[in-house]
Amino acid sequence: MLGRRQTVTGIGAGIFVLCVMAGVIGAAVLALMGAAATFETTGSALFSSYIWKVTQFTLLQACLSTVLSVGLAIPLARALARRQSFPGRRWLVRLLAVPIGLPPIVAALGIIEIWGRQGIINSALLSAGMSEPVSIYGLAGILIAHVFFNMPLATRLLLAQLDRVPPEYWRNASQLGLGSWTVFRLIEWPFMRSNLAPVCGLIFMLCVTSFTLVLLLGGGPAATTIEVAIYQALRFDFDPQRAVALALIQLTLTSVLLAMLALMGGSPSEGGTSGQASQRFPAKGSASLITDFSLICVSALFLLSPLVSVAVSGLLADFTQLLNEAIVWRAIATSLAIALAAALISITMGLCLIRARYAALPFASRHAWARLFRFSTTGASSLVLLVPPIVLGAGWFVLLRSHVDVFAMAPVIVIAVNALMALPFVMRVLEPAHTTHMARTAKLVQSLGIAGINRLVLVDWPGLRRSLLLAMAFAMALSLGDLGAIALFGSQDVITLPYLLLQRMGSYRTSDAAGLALLLGLVCLVLMILADRGRTNSHGSEL
């Protein structure tokens, strides 16, 4: 339990962070709603054929992407669960985490090189006699890219569910000689099904709010989502009325989706278990063996080929010429500065909210305000999911454009948006570690009278250092790869690596783009490896 001063300070810091978040997000939303009220024809804009066409395509690509990602993840997760001794299985499972932290613009470049008109797939199809190669631009390209990003995420989540099956289930299945289909129907499917709705909801949400992939692979007005249409309305057409109408539709969609996600969930009854580690026997039979190995190998090839392609193309780039350009070093410095500032702000906000929740805990059983306060601090970190970065940026664009030069405010707005974007991940990493740390040290610290800077240096930093560094790595990787906010506010004065990469792709300087993609990918990969090492070794910080 905290002392009176620490309790007041903790709750006060949490209230301050809540007010800041409410101000940043609320101002953007109110600006959009206010702008909608001032436009005389906003009502007609909402019901224009273009906006509804964009909305329909957004929902269509999200539905198809979700079905394909989860539909492919189910057999892959089952194959990985059944083949515990598959060569390189540990590294393959780690590979499934790479797309989570990989900048979408880097992955899109690799996908184009594999599936594009001059890519390996189309060259093979043309060699086989097909006259119409696969077009990477449009719905097909968006689906391939979304499956590349979301199938590994769904596989990891479903594999985690299969790892929860008690060992008694596998022992009984082996003793009874149950076949592969019966094991799937009676054991594997019930466990996967319990998590299927939240997984589908999460992936659908990610696809609805997808920006970078659709911007690069959309291929024109016929394949544009709401997020890209907002960006085009503000940066190219300067049509704030259309941007406001699209942002309101986006807010409505994300609100409905988050409400549905909150209602999803549930877990199967596991019954009695000895609590031992889950150990299953590999499925017998040559057919299942060939099927599992083929599935794992094809999936690994699908995930690795764009990454290898980016690495090869990047290594072929003229790094000497690239690194001699002052704008490249300026983009690197700006990216790192924005990522570091956003990560520090996000971690500070996360620690304040976590500390406030902990300080209010002793009052939660007796006072309604404490329960409401704890609920508010939890829900605050999810607000960024309700208001995607492009909508947040659009709101601030509308709010500031009449008063200041919005592009001069770019660094502040991009840092703020990136800090909020990373907050849910930071909270997810830090809160379990903080809870465990306080449970272990609170009584000892109180009995010894350690407080203030001494407690921070001698107790809190050693106990939370690994989780703090893990949260820092995640937050920096997310910020480094972000293109949403900087695409809206970026200019020649404020340019980051993803923004410079987008410019080089737009001017057909593909060699430079490949070199920048490799540079950006390596930085993010190092951060994700550090994060994964921290996740593996930390207590209770599973993502």
Image (cartoon, rainbow, N blue to C red):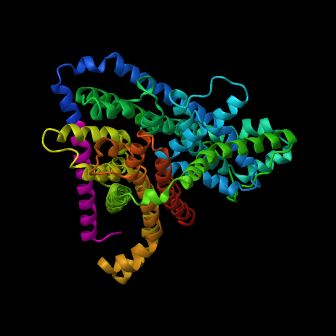
> Where does residue 35 sit, x and y in percent of width and height?
19, 30
Taking the spot 43% from the left edge, 50% from the top edge, the residue there is 481
Kindly identify the residue that appears in the image at 46 percent across and 72 percent down. 440
* Image spot of residue 486 (x, y percent): 33, 46
Q: Quadrant of residue 85?
A: bottom right
Compare residues 498 and 391 and report the one nearer the observer: 498
Which residue is at 57% across, 41% downward?
113
Q: Is residue 5 magenta?
A: yes
From the image, which quarter does the N terminus lie in?
A: bottom left
In the orientation shown, which residue stands out farthest toward the left? 403
Q: Residue 338 in the image: state x and y as whole percent.
A: 33, 57
Helix, strand or loop: magenta stretch: helix
How many circles with numbers are drawn on the protein?
0
In the image, 430 versus 511, the foreground residue is 511
- Residue 346 percent coordinates (x, y): 34, 57
Q: Which residues are magenta?
A: 1-30
176 in relation to 351, above or below: above
**Looking at the image, residue 73 lies above or below residue 481:** above
Is residue 104 at all visible to an observer of this figure? Answer: no
Could one spot residue 167 in this view of the protein?
Answer: yes
Q: Where is residue 111, by image quadrant?
A: top right
The image quarter containing residue 464 is bottom left
